[in-house]
Image: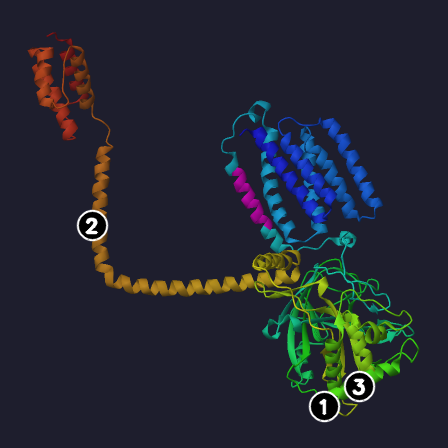
Amino acid sequence: MTLEKLHNWLTLATISVALLCLGVASGDILIMVAVLSAVALAVLFAERPLLSASVSDWLGFGLGSGAAVSAYISAANLLEVASFFLVFVQAVKLPARKRERDFRLLYAFSVLDVGVAAALTSDLSFGVLFLTFAFCSIWALSVHSVWLSATKESRQQPLKGLMGGVLFAAVVALSLSGVVFVLFPRIGAGFLSHTVGATYVSGVSDVMDLTDLGPIMRDDTEVLRVQVEGLPNQDASMLYLRGTTLVHYEDGVWRRASPATEEVLQEMGATRISGFPVWGVRSEQDARSLQSRFCRRWRRRVKVRVWLKPLLQKGGDEQFLFVMSEPMWLLFRGRLRPSKLYISPSGSIIWGERQYETVLYEAECALVNPSADLTNCSSPRYFRNVDYLQLPSETPGFPLKRLRELAETICVRAGANTPYQMARAIEDWLSRNLKYTLKPSRSDRSTDPTCDFLFNTKKGHCELFASAMALMLRSLGVACRVVTGFRGGVHNPVGDFYVVRRENAHAWVEVLLDDDTNPHNFNAVRWVTFDPTPPYEPPQRGLFSWVDDLISYLRHRWLTHVVLYGRGQQRALLKMIGRTGKKAAWSLRSFLRRLFGTLSAVLQTLLPFLVMAGCVFVVVILLRWRRRRRAKAPPQPALWFYQLLLAAAQKRGLKRKLSYTPFELQQLLVAVFGSRTRQEIEFLTRCFVEARYGRRVCGSEAQLKSALRRVLKSKA
């Protein structure tokens, strides 16, 4: 392959991978079609370009500007507008004839492609394409520098020895990039991150409106991932991630607080422990003793680690954090950390600003033990100045009396007398007698939607089930609230985490229980989860589900160790490297000590034999050296003159055999040159034998030369 062809193909590969990065990140079909079409045309017209350089300049700029303006008019964000412009400019330039400045322009655009793609997505597919781009771009730029310095004639000549050097440069550059990545954590997309769209999650907000019922579409879009320490048997049905707590019900709508009163949010304090700000504790000692605040006979400790993706929720820029039951402390491990956290009087944890990147945080939560006996617990009305028995007044649309009578009938039939027993009885009755549907409807618009669900349609989704249970319990004097969040998920056995999707959005009920009869001593079992929604069968896992698990695990590792790599991960990584280095140094030192001790004992035993072997070795080496020195000794003059004698004899007709000895040749030489030269021939033969076989000097060079001259002058 010539330098010209290699340069063109590497440039095409680099630009194609960069465009694929941008196309995959944008997720726009038009961009992907433009990218694939441009690459296909560039391959087809690699030898004979489709357009001239000047035409491609104007056409590319025109199409790129038109596509960008069209995207901007259709309310696309700035990054998407930039994507359209970059893609269409390069799509026209790829199959066209290129000048030197066109190559530089394409390389610059490829870097912009990857930068915009990095701001648009953090998926594993981008990581694979990015590594491919890095490898190709190093090759392409290295070859481009050689191509610029070469003449037109040398560009058409076959390549020799270039590929190895370029490969070495690529490996070194990628290795240095890895070191730079470890030493300098990512800082995020900055203000550009505010232009990236987030996932909208219905059903998880500070308002649950039941008046506008519509079909719920199943959506497997991933929302978060969670690792749980302390969840028995990895049972996904026990995984309830609380998002918002709703306490006020009016006109078919559940809210965090009454619209007539202003909800006062309390800021959660943060204490720096081991270099990390921890929310919810005042000191490190407070963090250690926090578990003892809860009665161990009721509570158990569960630790969760959550990777929360950007979400769009109703209610403005407020972002809810999802935890299990009641969190005791929060710790943010990723690059992104909040400046302030708030907690509502009803227990919702709120991030006061909108989130544009994936957030990694840990929480230690206190859950009620499944084996705890809660039968005799009471249910106080107020907790943290919140009324958990609020109910709308009796109206024709809201038959409160009928609702209370139904709840009492259920409890009487079940023999339920305490708040816990009442909650279990109503939960069981709802899940057995009412049906779950993704397409709820209302039979009477004048009736409260929850009452219409209970008395008329008897079909609904989780929000209606939770609302019905909460209103029935409150009518009996049992304090409770409605909670929205996520339930369950798909367990990944490879990475031991749960993948929670939009279709896992759920609503349930939490009942407030107290194990102390003294109203001023609130020992508090606190909030116990009840889920009246009928259980559903999780989808069966296919034969090749392990492939999905493996891909999900790889994406999880990419998200944790690359996308979310920040100061915390850097500190942990450097500490781990330091500990590993110290451990390796101590291991090497102890190994060398043991090795030297063993060698010392062996040497003391084998020392006489080693000395003898060494002496023999030295003698052998000296003999070989002497032999080689002799072999390399310069040739003696007798050998040279004897060869001249033989050459002259052959010219005079001497016919010799290889088997002849020098003394047999001596007689033939005398016959060729005459008997008068016998004395000189015998002298030359004797000197040759002494030099050749005895390596001794016989006669001087002048004597040998004189004898040879007399032989050659004689005539036979």
Q: Which residue, given by chain and number where applicable, does mark 3 sit on? A: 409
* Disc 2 crowd, CA 10 A, few/some/many (<14, 14-19, 20+): few
Q: Give the quadrant of residue 302.
A: bottom right
Q: CA distance from mark 3 to mark 1?
A: 21 Å
Magenta includes 167?
yes
- In which quadrant will I find the C terminus? top left
Q: Which residue, given by chain and number where applicable, does mark 2 sit on? A: 616
Q: Circles 3 and 2: CB distance less than 8 Å? A: no
Residue 646 lies, in percent from the top left, at 17, 17
Q: Which mark is residue 34?
A: none
Which sits earlier in the primary sequence, circle 1 or circle 2? 1
Magenta includes 264?
no
Residue 533 lies, in percent from the top left, at 73, 73
Q: Residue at x 23, y 52 (%)?
A: 614
* Disc 1 crowd, CA 10 A, few/some/many (<14, 14-19, 20+): some
Q: Residue at x 25, y 32 (%)?
A: 632
SS category of the residue bearing label 2: helix
- The magenta segment is 165-177
